[in-house]
């Protein structure tokens, strides 16, 4: 049995979706960052960094979303969630996952959760410009492509989660048009129960109306 500790709409949602795709025996434990649950003694005993995700396995606890996605793929090789280990294609998948995590994910943070001293108008405008430039590059990269790689992979699930963050109130009216990413997102949400899962998590954050503050999952230090 695998146990995933996850905060609603955080990057750890990619691990939740990956576990569902893998059909591995697992359970989900919610750790609500906005409520400070990631700083509880109980959770710090699992992950002393107080971040999500954390995946408890029979061999120990894994942290960091890219490592967890790779582990899930390797535990369910018949699902072909990532290319075979030891191949160029697997290295390319790791490159794409790293780009999404280290570049795209990071570009949201100064807009949605600016650090003290970086929340003035000039800093926020610069941060929004950088996010738009990052998403524009990603939009061009996805032009004419149904998936991040040649076939469906866990890269697509991480991208889907990151695109959902565009709904953050701090970004309303500030993002440029991204037709390729919109197309990708719509198609991914139309498959399986992904739309239901994301709607459930949005309701957990904002209530039934879906309105409220920015997604807690991109709070600096709350996830990785």
Image (tube, rainbow, N blue to C red):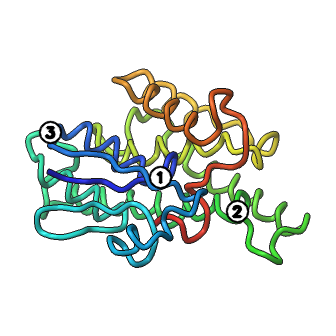
Q: In this view, does 166 lie to the left or right of 142?
A: right
Pointer 2 local density, CA inside 10 Å: few below 14, some 14–19, many at least 20: some
Q: Disc 2 designates what residue?
A: 113
The residue nearer to you, when weighing 210 against 139, is 210
Q: Is residue 157 left or right of residue 111?
A: left
Residue 76 in picture, x, y percent from top left: 12, 46
Query: Image point 76% across, 57% down: which residue?
Result: 128
**CA separation, marks 2 and 3?**
36 Å
The residue nearer to you, when weighing 29 against 40, is 40
Q: Is residue 22 above or below residue 179?
A: below
Q: Nearer the viewer, mark 1 or mark 3?
A: 1
- The picture quadrant where one finds residue 204 is top right
**CA separation, marks 2 and 1?**
16 Å
Q: Which of marks 2 and 3 is in front?
A: 2
Query: Image point 60% across, 57% down: which residue?
Result: 34
**Which of the two labelled residues, at mark 2 and mark 3, occupies the earlier sequence position?**
3
Do callouts 1 and 3 mark residues in contact (Cβ within 8 Å)?
no
Tag 2 secondary structure: loop
Q: Disc 1 designates what residue?
A: 7
- The picture quadrant where one finds residue 69 is bottom left
Q: Disc 3 designates what residue?
A: 79
**CA separation, marks 1 and 3?**
25 Å
Residue 3 in picture, x, y percent from top left: 25, 54
Q: Is residue 73 left or right of residue 157?
A: left
**Which of the two labelled residues, at mark 2 and mark 1, occupies the earlier sequence position?**
1
Q: Is residue 217 above or below residue 118?
A: above
């Amino acid at each position: 049995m695998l146990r995933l500790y996850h905060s609603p709409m955080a990057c750890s949602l990619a691990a939740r979706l990956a576990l569902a795709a893998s059909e591995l025996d697992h359970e989900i434990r919610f750790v609500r960052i906005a409520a400070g649950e990631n700083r509880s003694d109980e959770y710090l005993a699992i992950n002393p960094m107080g971040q999500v995700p954390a995946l408890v396995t029979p061999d120990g606890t894994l942290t960091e979303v890219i490592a967890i996605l790779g582990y899930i793929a390797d535990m369910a090789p018949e699902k072909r969630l990532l290319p075979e280990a030891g191949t160029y294609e697997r290295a390319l998948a790791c490159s794409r996952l790293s780009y999404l995590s280290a570049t795209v994910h990071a570009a949201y943070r100064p807009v949605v959760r600016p650090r003290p001293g970086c929340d003035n108008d000039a800093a926020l405008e610069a941060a929004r410009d950088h996010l738009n430039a990052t998403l524009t590059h990603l939009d061009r990269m996805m032009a004419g492509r149904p998936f991040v790689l040649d076939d469906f992979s866990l890269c697509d699930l991480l991208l889907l989660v990151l695109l959902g963050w565009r709904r953050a109130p701090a970004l309303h009216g500030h993002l440029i048009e991204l037709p390729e990413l919109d197309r990708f997102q719509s198609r991914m949400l139309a498959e399986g129960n992904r739309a239901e899962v994301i709607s459930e998590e949005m309701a957990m954050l904002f209530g039934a109306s879906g309105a409220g503050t920015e997604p807690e999952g991109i709070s600096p230090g709350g996830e990785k």
